[in-house]
Amino acid sequence: MFWLWWDGIRQDTSAETRARRARWLIQTLLELGPVFIKVGQSLSTRVDLLPPEYLTALSALQDSVPPFSTREAVATIEQELGRSLKEVFAEFVEVPLAAASLGQVHRARLHTGEAVVVKVQRPGLRALFDLDSRAVNKLIRVLRKRFDWARKLDLLGIYDEFFTILYQEIDYSIEGKNADRFRENFRDYPQIATPKVFWECSTTKVLTLEYLPGIKVDDVAALRANGLSPRAVNDLGIRSYLKQFLVDGFFHADPHPGNLAVRSDGTLIFYDYGMMAEIPALDKEQMVQTFFAILKKDANEVVDRFVAMGLLVPSSDMSPVKRIVQFVLDRFTEKPFDVKAFVEVKDEVYLLFEKQPFRLPAKMTYLLKSMSTLVGIALILDPQYNFKAAAQPFVKTLALATGNTGAIAEFARQAKDFLVYKFRQPSATEVILRRLEERLERGELLIQVQSLESERTLKRIEMAVLCVLYGCLAGLGAIAGVLLVALSFSRPGFGLWAVVCGIGTVLSLLKLSQSVLVLSLRTQIDRLVSK
């Protein structure tokens, strides 16, 4: 991210430079180990955040992480299962089918004839996790001491949530139970496939699963070559996650393209059930209400639900947030996301940037991570995807279902209410008049005689003046410090003042760095929304 920002400042955005930076990034992530490879996998689908050169490089982390030796893999299998390899498997392919951050997969065949894959854990993972977790914990504590933004975020809660699930990932017995639970949840959905677990050949470090081959979900050319519609695949993926989020409350938290594949008949296959997360019943109820508020484009309800879930800090004036939310609902529930469209509400964007009302509760970390990855995949499969259109078949199916109980019954009730709302939906003119009336009542519809562009220019000038001021102070402090150090050799009393000048210089440099960063961010936002 630093190099993207730095290259943007230098206006060096050539493909060659980006490719070089991307190669360096991949090598660095591989050297840093499993935790950082996971981060790279999550970023590999973000076509809305990263240039193509970075995405191409990061996609290699999905299924092309360097393997460890087959000798180590076989030794782990035999030690864990307490039997020789030939006693367990009739056939075993020594060349790994795929290697990932936490282990690698070998094809095999059981003596009973079933084709399987054997997932073997990398040696020494727990020691690496212990080292990474301590380093990240110390970094977070330093950030919380030094920076206000770090104190506002629930970084320690996010850290606990992240590493709790990562440690669960290195217990393959938990992954096997997750796979069984996921398969049970989708038992009545033949378009979703989950590999069967062979428990007699599985332990905490070895997991034997049914072999389910498929086309990688983001390989658009291969999907089309097999007569499959990328848009249909995308819609199926969205509906499957709506069920996971809103009905089951149990979801696959690592949906990068290496963990999703498509059969020739269009069935969507999920792999790797190590990173799964649960949504508590209360939060799931809030999410259901938020989902239908989004479909109804009700910004007031969406904001209320965000506050209830801890995603927004309530304030005396929520109108800028509501305007942004309404803008997003009007523009992007039926059209692809486009950051350039925010030029229409860039003043509200500035207010949000300054007030920072959004929060990331630890319990929402994996939910938002999954949604972020899914958005990236959706943009690859269908650049014109329509969330509302993809969601409506799912809503209708549940609304028409009978015999539902518990959470599904509540969801079905809300689905029926939404269908009634759609039938009675007011005309576009009525909606506009109602919103004008609401804005008048809230006092948001004002006649402003001012130049907003001039205000932004003045703010940038103010930040530039501060940069010059802090730069001058740092320079004067450095010069004074050098002179006082020279004088301290003949007059010892000046040594203390030299130290004071040195501290002042360091503080001025820190403030200068902060001001330069804020100024550059403002400039980048202006460029982004003005394009």
Image (cartoon, rainbow, N blue to C red):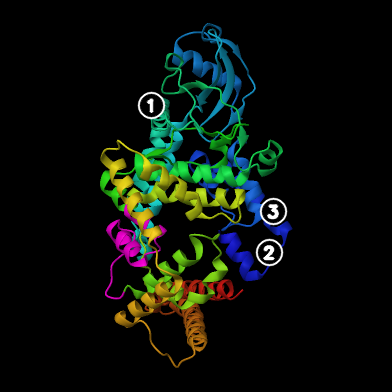
Tell me the magenta residue range: 288-317
According to the picture, the residue beneath numbered tag 2 turns out to be 13
Position of residue 152 in the picture relative to residue 228 (left or right): left
For the N terminus, the quadrant is: bottom right
Is residue 372 visible in this depiction of the protein?
Answer: yes
Determine whether the residue tagged by mark 1 lies in a helix, strand or loop: helix
Q: Please, is residue 323 above or below residue 260 in the view? A: below
Q: Is residue 29 magenta?
A: no
The x and y percentages for residue 448 are: 42, 90
According to the picture, the residue beneath numbered tag 3 turns out to be 20
According to the picture, the residue beneath numbered tag 1 turns out to be 177
User: Residue 403 appears in which quarter of the rendering?
Assistant: top left
State yes or no: discs 2 and 1 in contact (Cβ < 8 Å): no
User: Residue 349 appears in which quarter of the rendering?
Assistant: bottom left
Cα distance between the residues tagged 3 and 2: 11 Å
Q: Which marked residue is nearer to the observer: mark 2 or mark 1?
A: 1
Pick whichever, 247 or 317, lies toward us.
Answer: 247
Of labels 2 and 1, earlier in sequence is 2
What residue is shown at x 50% (from left), y 38% (from top)?
34
